[in-house]
Structures are given as C-alpha cells and as structure tokens.
Amino acid sequence: MIFGSDPDAPSFGTLRKLHGMLPSLAKDLASGKMKGKGGKLAKTRPRKMCRVCCKTFDLAACPDDTPLTPSLCDECEPVLKDGYVAIVSGDKFAFIKHESLTDLGGTVQHVSIPVFEQFQAKFEAAVKERQKDEKGEA
Ligand SMILES: [Zn+2]
C-alpha cells in the first residue's frame, strides 16, 4: 500500500496479518508441503527477498543453503521508482511521499520501531483529519 494516497486502504492490522502469512507460505513451498497437481514437484527455494516487504521470490530449484539475496519485488520497485520513500522497521513497512522527503525519494530507510510508530501515528492522524474534513465536521 501507499501511505497518504488512499484513506480507504486496509488497516495496519490487516496488512500485518497478510504479511505474516507470506513467510509461512514461502516456507511451505520450499519444504514441499504445498504441491501442485500431481505432487512430486522439483524442490524449489526463493533466491531473492524484497528489502521492503520481505516477500521472497525468484523461486528456483537450488541447494538448501542458497542464500537469499536482498532485492526489490515487482510491487515495491515501481513505487520506489515513482519517488516514494520506503520506511522499513522489522516486519513493518510503509511508502511515504512528502515534500520534506524529496531527497530520500526512491530509497529504503530502515528505522527503529518507535520512529516507525511515530510515522504510523502521524499518518493515521492525517487520515482521520481528512475524513473529518470530507464529512464536513468541524
Ligand atoms: Zn516488496
């Protein structure tokens, strides 16, 4: 999702839940628990992990000890190219575009959890403010 662009965007909780499902899905795929029709697929592992959303991709049949290369997935890369800053803290991430952050456009910024929570709080306050304006409440 892109912060600041869509007041109807899913909540952080929803995103975190969805995001939390990704690693186990990737693990199941890698361990062969999930199989396509007919089973017995070649064992594949992801070779790349997105630096922003931690999504693993670029699945290929390769040895178990193949390291994950930090990369950008096909969802995050275009957003960064569009001039957004990716704010990443642990398993949380957000895209922000703001005039005060123009210098950082297109970069990935790792921040501590308290800093991220400040961003989150400011964003949520801004969304509430905007929704209030749209409803015409003073
Ligand atoms: Zn990504």
Image (spheres, helix red, strand yellow):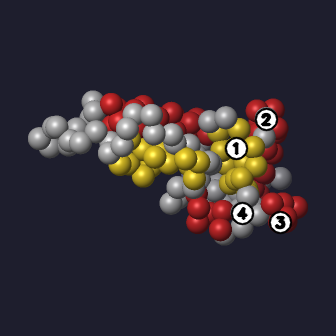
Question: Residue 102's spot in the image, x, y percent?
Answer: 83, 66
Q: Which amino acid does label 1 sit on?
A: Val
Please rate how many residues cluster around mark 4, counting C-alpha atoms within 10 Å: few if below 14, some from 14 to 19, many from 20.
some
Along the line of sight, which residue is nearer the eye, 26 or 95?
A: 26
Question: Residue 122's spot in the image, x, y percent?
Answer: 80, 45
Q: Which amino acid does label 2 sit on?
A: Ser
> Going from the N terminus, do you reach mark 2 or mark 3 first?
3
In the drawing, what numbered circle is on residue 102? 3
Q: What residue type is labelled 3?
A: Thr
Along the line of sight, which residue is nearer the eye, 68 or 119?
A: 68
Task: Give the Cα distance between marks 2 and 1.
Answer: 8 Å
The answer to whether the residues at label 4 and label 3 have Cβ atoms under 8 Å apart is no
Residue where numbered disc 1 is placed = 88
Q: Which amino acid does label 4 sit on?
A: Gly
Task: Give the Cα distance between marks 4 and 1.
Answer: 13 Å
Question: Residue at 36% across / 43% down in the picture?
Answer: 62
Task: Give the Cα distance between marks 2 and 3.
Answer: 21 Å
The CB of the residue at mark 1 lies under 8 Å from ligand 1: no
Along the line of sight, which residue is nearer the eye, 138 or 40?
A: 40
Residue where numbered disc 4 is placed = 106
Question: Residue 138's spot in the image, x, y percent?
Answer: 83, 53
> Going from the N terminus, do you reach mark 4 or mark 2 first?
4
What secondary structure is marked by label 2?
loop
Question: Residue at 11% across / 41% down in the picture?
Answer: 38
Residue where numbered disc 2 is placed = 112
What secondary structure is marked by label 1?
strand
